[in-house]
């Protein structure tokens, strides 16, 4: 186990890491825009871009849906992409009616657990508006659809646990919108919490830890996610608010904080430094419980990407 991995587990377990684990995620479209100029920045920060090999960005393999065009997944959802290097969106939902739910069978193909494995999968199958009506009216088809998706996910999870020896399993499912959950916390607890509880407890039963990513505002249900077995939560700064994350997370669960990607394209390097310092001061502690993540889309200027890396490197040693 290298020094980063040691700090990662110490941060997760509140065992006094030597530095705050940090990461910068660069979208394929960001690499396509900046190329070698971006690589020069990456090479200057080996503690953030661990193991990066010069020139490797030219050979990165993008996920299928990051390519321009249309793609059909194993459930029959059609993904449309108009910008190579950015993620696609679902534009055709194969289960548009409740009658179609009753005819639905899970795919025979084992395609793993992609981002959006549970809640987003329901929305991709039904369409957002139809799914919201289902949650409002609570027809029997809603639970039937949830059961079908959950059964498939449990099959995928069993395969992953048999073949992936990683001590931390990644789960990603965007549960929130910009200013709220799409459904009430009570409805989430009734219909969706049991799904995450079953999957995460099964993961723990096999001696693994749970990393949970979610875009959007989720702080009202973070205590529930902790109860379900999340060991590391990856929430967005802007959608949740730092004070809400301090209240719901600090000392209770390790946070891999998704820094404010909505400010990165428009702010100054000084703003970035203030932002990261505030996050560390309020959410961090010498014991651990904090990691920092910054995602950079192609609209982030190079000087701001440099500033993000510089500030992350500096404040990763804040408690050392």
Image (spheres, rainbow, N blue to C red):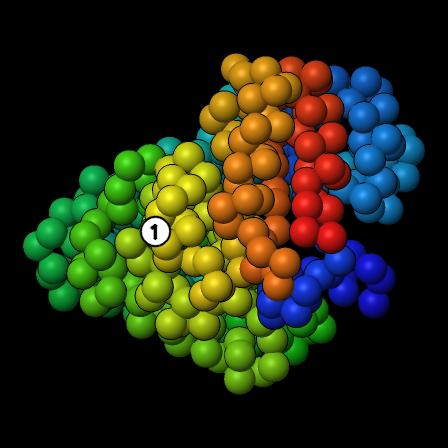
Snapshot quadrant of residue 69: top right
Q: Position of residue 48 (x, y in %)?
A: 76, 42
In the rendered view, would you say 192 is above or below 34? below
Crowd class of label 1 (few under 14; some 14 to 19; many from 20; radius 10 Å) = many
Tag count in the figure?
1
Q: Is residue 198 left or right of residue 110?
A: left
Q: Is residue 310 visible?
A: yes
Residue found at x 53% / y 71%: 157
Residue 37, compared with residue 104, is above or below; it is above
Q: Is residue 174 left or right of residue 22?
A: left
Residue 162 at x, y percent in the picture: 65, 78
| 136 and 307: which is toward the camera | 307
Furthest toward the right, the residue is 54
272 is higher (above) or lower (below) than 50: above
Asked if 284 appears above or below 276 in the picture, the reply is below
The residue shown at (83%, 67%) is 1
Residue corresponding to mark 1: 219
Q: Of helix, strand and loop, which one carries label 1?
A: helix
Say whether residue 32 is left or right of residue 1.
left
Q: Residue at x 22, y 56 (%)?
A: 185
Q: Residue at x 68, y 51 (%)?
A: 319
Which x, y percent locates residue 299? 58, 17
Return the x and y of residue 19 as percentages of the image width and height. 73, 53
**Residue 216 appearing in the image:** no
Query: Which quadrant of the figure has residue 295?
Result: top right
Farthest bottom residue in view: 205
For this view, does 51 lie left or right of residue 223?
Answer: right
């Amino acid at each position: 186990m290298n020094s980063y991995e040691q700090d990662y587990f110490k941060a997760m377990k509140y065992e006094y890491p030597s530095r705050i684990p940090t990461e910068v995620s660069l979208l394929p479209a960001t690499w396509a825009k900046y190329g070698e100029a971006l690589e020069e920045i990456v090479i200057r920060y080996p503690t953030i871009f661990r193991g990066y090999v010069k020139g490797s960005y030219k050979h990165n393999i993008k996920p299928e849906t990051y390519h321009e065009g249309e793609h059909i997944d194993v459930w029959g959802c059609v993904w449309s992409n108009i910008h190579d290097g950015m993620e696609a969106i679902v534009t055709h939902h194969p289960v548009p009616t409740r009658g179609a739910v009753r005819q639905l069978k899970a795919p025979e193909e084992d395609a793993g657990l992609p981002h959006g494995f549970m809640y987003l999968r329901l929305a991709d199958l039904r369409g957002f508006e139809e799914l919201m009506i289902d949650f409002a009216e609570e027809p029997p088809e809603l639970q039937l659809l949830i059961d079908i998706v959950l059964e498939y996910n449990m099959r995928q999870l069993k395969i992953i646990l048999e073949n992936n020896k990683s001590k931390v399993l990644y789960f990603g499912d965007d549960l929130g919108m910009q200013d709220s959950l799409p459904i009430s916390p009570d409805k989430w607890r009734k219909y969706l919490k049991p799904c995450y509880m079953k999957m995460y407890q099964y993961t723990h039963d096999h001696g693994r830890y749970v990393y949970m990513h979610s875009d959007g505002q989720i702080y009202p249900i973070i205590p529930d996610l902790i109860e379900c077995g999340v060991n590391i939560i990856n929430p967005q700064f802007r959608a949740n608010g730092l004070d809400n994350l301090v209240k719901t997370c600090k000392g209770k669960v390790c946070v891999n904080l998704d820094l404010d990607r909505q400010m990165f394209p428009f702010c100054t390097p000084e703003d970035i430094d203030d932002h990261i310092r505030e996050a560390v001061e309020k959410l961090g502690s010498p014991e651990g419980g904090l990691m920092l993540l910054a995602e950079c889309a192609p609209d982030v200027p190079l000087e701001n990407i440099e500033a993000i890396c510089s500030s992350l490197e500096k404040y990763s040693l804040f408690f050392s």
